[in-house]
Amino acid sequence: MHFLQQAYMSDSRLKRVFCIGAANIDRKVKLIDPVQFHTSNPAESFYSSGGVARNVAENLARLQCPVSLISLFGDDQDRGQICKEMQNLNIDFQHSLTLSEQRTGNYICVNAPDGELILATADMSIYDHFSLNWLEELWSKIKPAEWIFVDSNLPADSLQCLIQHAAQDNLALCVDPVSASKAKKLPNLLEGIEILFPDGSEAEAMTGISWQGKPSCREVWKHLQDRGLKKLIISMGGEGIFAATPGESEFMPAHPVPVTDVTGAGDALAAGVIWGLQQNLSFLEACEMGIRNASFTVQSKETVCSKLTPVRLQTYEGN
């Protein structure tokens, strides 16, 4: 497929995207040999800034899109590292808060030698303080945005507040359910969501439909469409994605690339799709931008590929 025959839009022509949710430190361990439980395993370790909303914000910033992050931090060393990196990336975080009695979010994962996830832990209790009143006060700042991205680390009432406001003001809201347990925070009515980005387990948690891979996708889409969802992108890892709108649906394969670490691939997918739609691509063309971006990420030790640029994404051929 061929996209972006014209030059991509620069940041001066793009409206700001607000990303709302987690900003963590990711501590990642990659095993050298197959896992052996109940004993020590030789491994390589690496850490970087992470968090779903922060990852999407960094991807968009590297794609030269104006972006703001609204998150919560503890008054600790991890906050200092994250904020320094965001300043260097020109990510606006003036509306984020520092809570002195809390710890900045932390994510720890153990990956197999092939880069696939074995186990992860997430200390995200700080995001319980994303209060409904605070978001109501911030809405006048968020409302001018063309696109809003939110992750489900927020409390259920705060998520519902954002979804309702987006519906009332006709804004494009994208939601990542984050995990099967957090997906259950989303309300029954999804009319305020422009694009939902679940994986299979999250789709099952939201719908009650037993996840069987590709055969389940269209049933999941019908269920969520009946609840008011406008667009759906189900991530299926190495198999690719299922993308659906009321007028079309398609399975789109992942690029066959060597996998170093899958952390952040879903966030790269979401950011690539949003960027593609801002470039006035069709929905499926924008999905291809997301797949390309995810392929960059899985080949990198970093949660967001530092070599990402608009030109690389535009010209990438999948090898």
Image: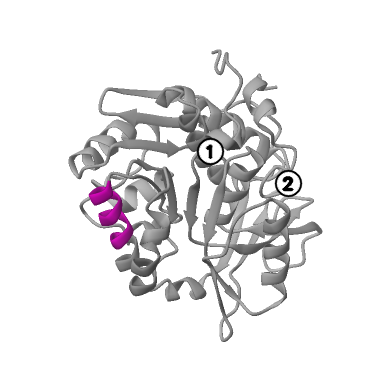
Which residue corresponds to mark 1? 269
User: Is label 1 in a helix, a strand or a loop?
Assistant: helix
Judge left or right: residue 274 versus residue 136. Answer: right
**Which span of residues is magenta-colored?**
160-169
User: How far is mark 1 from mark 2, CA to CA?
Assistant: 23 Å
Residue 143 falls within the magenta-colored stretch: no
Q: Tell me which label, 1 or 2, sits earlier in the chain.
A: 2
What is the chief secondary structure element of the magenta stretch? helix
Evaluate whether residue 247 shows in this view. yes
Which residue corresponds to mark 2? 113
For the C terminus, the image quarter is: top right
Q: Residue furthest left?
A: 226
Q: For the residue marked with disc 1, what is the amino acid?
A: Leu
Residue closer to the observer: 246 or 18: 18
Residue 315 occupies which quadrant of the picture?
Answer: top right
User: Is label 2 in a helix, a strand or a loop?
Assistant: loop
Residue 168 falls within the magenta-colored stretch: yes
Which residue is located at x 55 percent, y 28 percent? 289
- Image coordinates of residue 161 in percent, x first then y, are 29, 62
Could you classify mark 2 by the number of other residues whose Cα lies within 10 Å: few (under 14), some (14-19), or many (20 or more)? some
Which residue is located at x 50 percent, y 45 percent? 16
Q: For the residue marked with disc 2, what is the amino acid?
A: Pro
Residue 38 occupies which quadrant of the picture?
Answer: bottom right
For the N terminus, the image quarter is: top right
111 over 300 or under it: above or below: below
Judge left or right: residue 102 versus residue 90. Answer: left
